Image: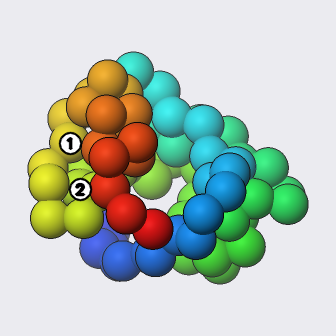
Amino acid sequence: MSSTYEVTFREGSLGLGLSEFNEVVEMEESGQAYNSSCIRIGDLLTCIGDIPVHNLEESAEQFSSQPR
């Protein structure tokens, strides 16, 4: 079963580890991702803001350029 959800992050560490193809592979218990209560290990990151992302390089670029 697939779900889509939106999470808004504040300034600071997301506490999120992604694989080369944007699968969530780790989360820090003190991080924003873990505390969102909806992101889980194995989830796939598909967009940051309204920008589709397909790999870790694209995600890193968008994380650094998108406002929070």
Specify the label residue 53 is tagged with. Answer: 1
| Crowding at mark 2 (Cα within 10 Å: few <14, some 14-19, many 20+) | some
Q: Is residue 22 visible?
A: no
Residue at (29%, 73%) from the top-left corner? 4
Quadrant into which the N terminus falls: bottom left
Q: Nearer the viewer, residue 10 or 1?
A: 10
Residue 18 visible in rendering: yes
Towards the viewer: 43 or 56? 56
Where is residue 8 drawn, in percent x and y? Answer: 46, 76
8 vs 30: above or below: below
Q: Secondary structure at mark 2?
A: strand
Q: Which residue is mark 2?
A: 47
Mark 2 near mark 1, Cβ–Cβ under 8 Å? yes
Disc nearer the start of the sequence (2/1): 2
The quarter of the displayed image where residue 34 is located: bottom right
Q: Amino acid at mark 1?
A: Val
The residue located at (40%, 46%) in the rendering is 63
Q: Residue furthest right?
A: 30
Place of residue 51 in the rendered image (x, y in percent of width and height, measured from the top left): 14, 54
How far apart marks 2 and 1 lie (CA) works out to 5 Å
Between 14 and 64, the one lying in front of the other is: 64
Image position of 13 (left or right of 23): right
- Residue at 20% across, 35% down: 54
Q: Which image quarter holds the C terminus?
A: bottom left
Residue drawn at the location 14% of the way across and 50% of the way down: 52
Rendering quarter of residue 48: bottom left
The secondary element bearing badge 1 is classed as loop
Horizontally, residue 1 falls left or right of residue 42, namely left
Q: In the rendered structure, which amino acid carries the disc numbered 2? A: Cys
